[in-house]
Image (spheres, grey):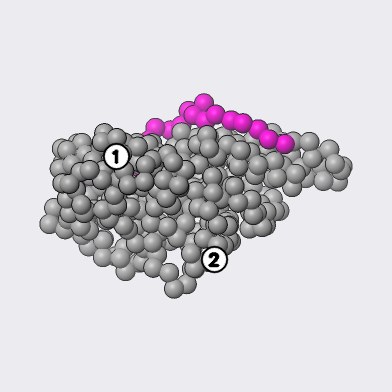
Amino acid sequence: MRRKNVGIVTMAAVLGLSAMLTGCSSGSGQTEAAPENAAESTTAGGSAAEDGAEEAQVNHGGEDGVFTIAYAPNESTDQSTDARNGLARDLSELLGCEVEEIQASDYNAIIEALRTGKADMAYMGALAIALGVERAGVEPIAMKADDGDPEKAIYHSVLIANSGNDEINSIADIKGKTMAFVDPDSTSGNLVPCSEIIKAFPDDNLNSDMLHTNGDFFEAVSYSGSHQAGLQAVAKGDVDVAPISDQILASEIANGNVEDGAVKIIHESDAIPAEAMVVAESVDDETQQMLQDFLIAYDNEAYFTDVIKNPGARFIPCDISDYEPIIELNNIMNVEQ
């Protein structure tokens, strides 16, 4: 379902970038396939299945009787544990089965867990959703939106530098510096900032591989593993530049995890389709509808503040059409000649 009157990364912008990427090689970057122990798990609930024989006949937990939710490092902080467990307990009551959460090492591990039946639902960014649809047949069912308003189902990727670094004040100043992207499958932590950098330096004929190779465009480049880790690296002066979700940045400052004023925003992207809950291909239609209804009605503010990092947000219905601009952008960024 399309959001209206919102400046989400437009197809026109995507096509404009395509012209600049002639000759670019594959560079989305793949992490190693996640091992079975790539995630830690915690459980919640599980007794509601005893409430009635009729309800017990429907196994919403799948073959193992357990419904599993996967989260990335961004949502798996210690500060969000209680809120995540709260949603698990509430969902356990609805489904009548045990609800477990796994804290995955990265988005690739989440996609693999969804593909292999080790996870039934996950919270992911736009690029991870696009890759999950391709690799695992996942289905997005509910995306976050400020105030539950479909017009506000967006966020931005921002580039940050240490406030004390007078040499870096805009995206034009980042060439030759050190960069810490977030994750190969991160939207605001890799895909979108890469496209923004390529557009900002048209004469350099950049592609994704060049942006991820030490000594090409950046002096040194790495992956931090999470938005929070990249933020801390910039604040401490360990790296010069890092991309981060503007909402995660605001949350980290509000929670006192980084001093207000420690970093400065040197560039902001166009709007990006918001993150969403997705379900695995194995989740049946009845359970999928129950999950969507549950999420859209869910109003535990602690969950949206501590886990989603977006106070006042709520879930709204969505489908794969909401992420078509990101799917197209990813295809363009990975064109091979």
Q: Residue furthest left?
A: 203
Above or below for 8 versus 47: below
Q: What residue type is labelled 2?
A: Asp
**Quarter location, residue 196:** bottom left
Residue 20 picture location, percent across and down: 20, 59
Q: Please tell me how crowded label 2 is: few (under 14), some (14-19), or many (20+) other residues with Cα within 10 Å.
A: some
Q: Circle 1 sits in a helix, a strand or a loop, which is it? A: helix
Lateral position of residue 55 relative to residue 14, left or right: right
Tell me the SS state at disc 2: loop
> What number is the disc on residue 234?
1
Residue 57 in the image, given as x and y percentages of width and height: 81, 43
Residue 43 forms part of the magenta stretch: yes
What type is the residue that disc 1 sits on? Val
Q: Quick check: can you spot residue 95?
A: no
Tell me where residue 324 sits by quadrant. Answer: bottom left
Instruction: Tell me which residue sits at (65%, 33%) in the image.
Output: 43
Q: Residue at 43% across / 33% down in the picture?
A: 33
